[in-house]
Amino acid sequence: MTRQLSPTEAGIAYFQRIEPLIEEMQQAIAVATDISGQPKGRLRVTTSVSFGLKCIVPLLPNFGTVYPELAIELLLTDAVVDLVTERIDVAIRLGLLPDSTLIAQQLMQVKISSKL
């Protein structure tokens, strides 16, 4: 003897309402995880002027060759930028991160010269 389950009217109504949402989510996931696995689109990056010119700009030609479908928009500024308002994806800063909700990852050690 096999057991059968049948949804309630509320369960059927619930499923009918969420089914289009599930399909939308699956389509969004498919778009976000491109089949090629290669990054593409626009990446907005900000860093200080001196670090950007010395360390980031020289890397851009090779980076563009390796990731041809990824456009880097580089904002070089020594001002504190509102990352949300400016829609910044990555901010590279020197020094310690003050208490915040941001996530920091050390990329390299920098020796600061006392000479001006």
Image (spheres, rainbow, N blue to C red):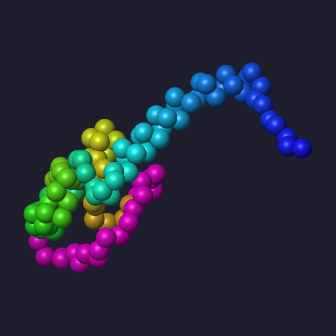
Closer to the camera in the image, 90 or 35: 35
Q: Main secondary structure of the magenta part?
A: loop
With respect to residue 67, does 22 lie above or below?
A: above
Closer to the camera in the image, 76 or 33: 33
Q: Position of residue 2 (x, y in %)?
A: 85, 43
Position of 58 with respect to 91 (left or right) is left
Taking the spot 38% from the left edge, 66% from the top edge, the residue there is 105
Q: How many dots with numbers?
A: 0
Position of 15 with respect to 84 (left or right) is right
Position of 23 with respect to 65 (left or right) is right
- The magenta stretch is 98-116
Closer to the camera in the image, 42 or 40: 40
Q: Position of residue 57 (x, y in %)?
A: 12, 62
Name the image quarter holding the C terminus: bottom left
Taking the spot 34% from the left edge, 53% from the top edge, the residue there is 35
Taking the spot 80% from the left edge, 35% from the top edge, the residue there is 5
Name the image quarter holding the N terminus: top right
Q: Is residue 40 visible?
A: yes
With respect to residue 27, does 78 lie above or below?
A: below
Taking the spot 13% from the left edge, 63% from the top edge, the residue there is 65
Q: Check residue 115 for magenta coloring.
A: yes
Q: Check residue 88 for magenta coloring.
A: no
With respect to residue 31, does 13 lie above or below?
A: above
Q: Position of residue 42 (x, y in %)?
A: 23, 47
Q: Is residue 51 visible?
A: no
Q: Position of residue 64 (x, y in %)?
A: 14, 60
Residue 14 image-quadrant placement: top right
Residue most extreme to the right? 1
Closer to the camera in the image, 62 or 8: 8
